[in-house]
Image (spheres, helix red, strand yellow):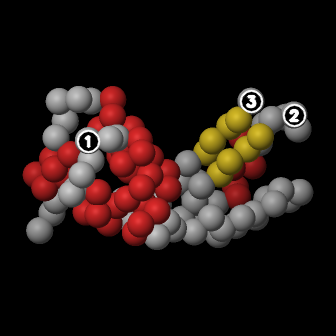
Amino acid sequence: MLLVLDDARDAAQVLPLLPPAECLLLVTSRQYFTLPGWEARDIGLLSEAEARRLLRKIALRIKDEADEIARLCGYLPIALRAAASLLAATPDLDPSAWKRFTIR
């Protein structure tokens, strides 16, 4: 089993949720912290080209909007995958719909 804990605040929030040893744990966070006995890795951000490729691989209909969607997702892999997956699973959602929700 793989347990994904997204946007964890700190180690104190994650510690009570640690799975049994035979499970995998993936924790994403905007903060850097470590857990006793666990390895921490900074996966960083994707480049503009990598983000564009990921978006277009998941949601083929993303064309010219890829760069702006990637920017709005902060080039964060999980945010990019979530945005592209939403577009892939929702055929009537226009990839340029982000324009209506952008705060100016």
Q: Is residue 48 visible?
A: yes
Q: CA distance from mark 3 to mark 1?
A: 32 Å
Residue type for callout 3: Met
Question: Dot 3 surroundings within 10 Å: few (below 14), some, or many (20 or more)?
Answer: few
Q: Which mark is residue 22?
A: 2
- Residue drawn at 71 percent across, 35 percent down: 2
Q: With 75 as the anchor, is 100 left or right in this view?
A: left
Q: Are marks 2 and 3 in contact (CB under 8 Å)?
A: yes
Spot occupied by residue 73 in the image (x, y as percentages of width and height): 36, 59
Spot occupied by residue 8 in the image (x, y as percentages of width and height): 58, 54
Quarter-of-image position of residue 1: top right
- Which callout, 1 or 2, points to the residue nearer the camera? 1
Residue type for callout 2: Glu
Q: Please state which of residues 104 and 68 is positioned toward the viewer in this rendering.
A: 68
Spot occupied by residue 5 in the image (x, y as percentages of width and height): 61, 45
Q: Which residue is mark 3?
A: 1
- Count of residue discs: 3
Q: With 83 as the anchor, is 43 left or right in this view?
A: right
